[in-house]
Image: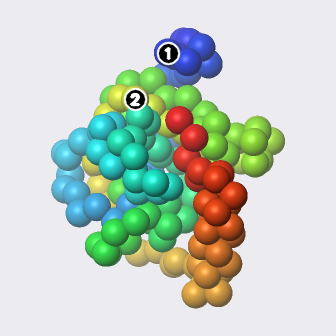
Amino acid sequence: MEINESGDKASQPNDFTTYYHGTKANLSTGDLIEVGFNSNYGQEKKAKYIYLTATLPAAIWGAELALGEGRERIYIVEPTGPIEDDPNLTDKKFPGNPTKSYRSRHPFRVIGEITDWQGHSPEELKTMKTNLEKLKKLGIEAIED
């Protein structure tokens, strides 16, 4: 176990875990997803971290809630460096890490795309977006760096 720049525990990715990244970006196998681009969420600040998950349901939410006009996509990615639990979900919202959501400052390499997946119903999406809008009005960001 390593300690990251913020003093939290970080771990090396598990070679046997499949990781996903949900987005609306059009990427190809071999592309790198890196920090420094505008975030898909919140106020679209320059992202200090990039996010991935080891569960398809969490990646589906990521794709569906991402900003932009592109098609919702879910990529299979491999981290190129240490990852840490996503503090936006872990313990603040869900004790432990049941969504298996992580973040890193190191790039993720796209190694494939999941093209056959079922999204949420329009009602579920509307409820989630309404709740996120309420948080935004309260000054609570979806992503806290």
The residue carrying mark 2 is 105
- Is residue 69 shown left or right of residue 12? left
**For the residue labelled by badge 2, is the local secondary structure a helix, a strand or a loop?**
loop
The residue at the point 29 percent across, 45 percent down is 37
Above or below residue 33? Residue 135 is below
Q: Is residue 15 left or right of residue 33?
A: right
Which of the 4 image quarters holds residue 144? Answer: top right
Q: Is residue 66 found left or right of 137 in the rendered image?
A: left
Relative image position of residue 54 (x, y in whole percent)? 54, 47
71 vs 131, left or right, is left
Q: Residue at x 35, y 42 (%)?
A: 46
> Looking at the image, which residue is at 38% across and 61% down?
23
Report whether residue 14 is seen: no
Whether tag 2 and tag 1 are in contact, CB under 8 A, the answer is yes
Extreme residue in the bottom direction = 122
Residue bearing the label numbered 1:
5
Please tell me which of labels 2 and 1 falls first in the chain.
Answer: 1
Task: Tell which of 124 and 44 is nearer to you.
Answer: 44
| Above or below, comparing residue 71 to residue 61 in the picture | below
The type of residue carrying mark 1 is Glu
Q: For the residue marked with disc 2, what is the amino acid?
A: Arg
Q: CA distance from mark 2 to mark 1?
A: 10 Å
User: How many marks are shown on the rendered structure?
Assistant: 2
**How far across and how far down the image is residue 123, in percent?**
64, 87
Tell me the element at label 1. loop
The picture quadrant where one finds residue 25 is: bottom left
Q: Residue at x 40, y 53 (%)?
A: 44
Q: Position of residue 88 (x, y in %)?
A: 63, 43
